Image (cartoon, rainbow, N blue to C red):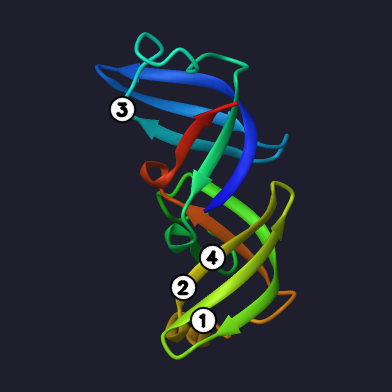
Amino acid sequence: MNNFEGFIKTVHVNGNLSIVDIEVTSDILMKAIIIDTPETASYLKSNANVSILFKETEVIIGLGDQSGNSLQNKIPAIITCVEIGNLLCKLDLKSDAGVFTAIISAAAAAALNLKVEDEVTAMIKLNEVMLRSL
């Protein structure tokens, strides 16, 4: 499980759902959709410190400009290690947010010709991000 730390900037509520904006660094803002509200989860408040968790298999890797998609969690990163197996590929990534891992298909890694020191954008859907109070 990948883990970053940050603090809650804002919480947008509609019914029993909240979209939470989390500042990881001054340049990296992540979002999570939570089935909770500040009334039902006391940690959902501005400036609260949280851990941001997401599975390695939920990371999407893109090359070049990624402005033309709907994914809101975009983390610029550099590949530090590529381990290609028969079916899957493990990528170790370094970013301003920290070090993390992505697992993608070996076919996708080959199609993108991924290698160490490539600059990529790691993307995570906001419904795949979990929060934990610190």
Mark 3 vs mark 1, CA separation in Å: 34 Å
How far from the left and from the top, in percent, is residue 84?
55, 86
Residue on which disc 3 sits: 35
Residue at screen point 68% across, 60% down: 77
Give the residue type that dot 2 points to: Ile
Looking at the image, which is closer to me, 71 or 42? 42
Disc 3 or 2, which lies upstream in sequence?
A: 3
Q: Which mark is residue 102?
A: 4
| Amino acid at dot 3 | Ile
Q: Which of marks 3 and 1 is in front?
A: 3
Q: Residue at x 53, y 81 (%)?
A: 112
Q: Which mark is residue 53?
A: none
Task: Reply above or below: 72 against 101.
Answer: above
**SS of the residue under disc 4:** strand
Give yes or no for contact between labels 3 and 4 (Cβ–Cβ under 8 Å): no
- The answer for how far apart the CA atoms under marks 3 and 2 are is 28 Å
Mark 2–mark 4 contact, CB under 8 Å?
yes
> Which tag, 4 or 1, sits closer to the chain's start?
4
Q: What element does badge 3 sit on?
A: loop
Return the residue at label 1. 109
Q: Name the residue under label 2.
A: 104
Residue at the (44%, 35%) spot, across then down: 32
At label 3, counting other C-alpha atoms closer than 10 Å, the crowd grade (few under 14, some 14-19, many 20 or more) is some
Labels 3 and 4: the sequence-earlier one: 3
Depth check: give the residue in front, 65 or 56.
56
